[in-house]
Image (tube, helix red, strand yellow):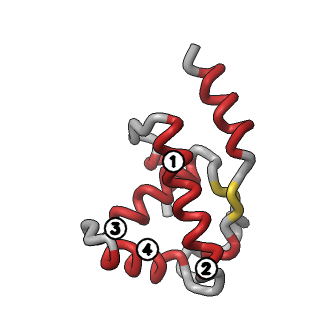
Amino acid sequence: MDLLNAGGHKETPESAIEQARFYADYFAKHPTKTLINTCKEIDSAYELDLGESLYEIRCLMADRYFTFDIFTPVQKLQVGQLNLGDVDQIKEVLRVSNQ
């Protein structure tokens, strides 16, 4: 999983926060599922292109909406190991950096 190449997205901070909260709620309901299986499930349930939710989550991780242990191989990463960051602080940093 190459987070460095996920930075090409153009989400507004508000939509990124909504996405992060949606995924955090979903993760809380299924904490022992792997990230990859969860993304397949979300893509199927919401009729997204295969890999779309994984891309969105990668972007959120790259922007530090989610924190995780980088030493855990992505194939074994469970969604319960992804922690939603301080959304208000992230919002403030993004606001300041866009001025």
Q: What's the amino acid at mark 1?
A: Leu
User: Mark 3 near mark 4, Cβ–Cβ under 8 Å?
Assistant: yes
Give above or below for 78 relative to 96.
below
Foreground: disc 1 or disc 2: 2
Mark-to-mark CA distance, 4 and 1: 20 Å
Q: Nearer the viewer, mark 2 or mark 3?
A: 2
**Residue at 46% of width from left, 83% of height from top?**
37
Q: Amino acid at mark 4?
A: Cys
Amino acid type at mark 2: Lys
Q: Secondary structure at mark 2?
A: helix
State the separation of the CA atoms marked 3 and 4.
7 Å
Q: Earlier in the sequence, mark 4 or mark 2?
A: 2
Residue 75 in percent (x, y) is at 53, 80
Residue at mark 2: 29
Residue 31 sits above or below residue 52 on the image: below
* Circle 3 crowding by C-alpha within 10 Å: few under 14, some 14–19, many from 20: some
Q: Residue at x 49, y 64 (%)?
A: 1
Can you give x and y, in whole percent of width and height, for residue 55 in the image?
A: 40, 58
Asked where in the image residue 9 lies, by quadrant, the reply is top left
Q: Position of residue 94 (x, y in %)?
A: 61, 29
| Amino acid type at image mark 3 | Gly
Considering the numbered disc 3 on the image, is that residue within a helix, a strand or a loop?
A: loop
Name the residue tied to disc 3. Answer: 51
* Quadrant of residue 23 within the rendered picture: bottom right
Residue topped by disc 4: 39
Residue 74's tag is: none
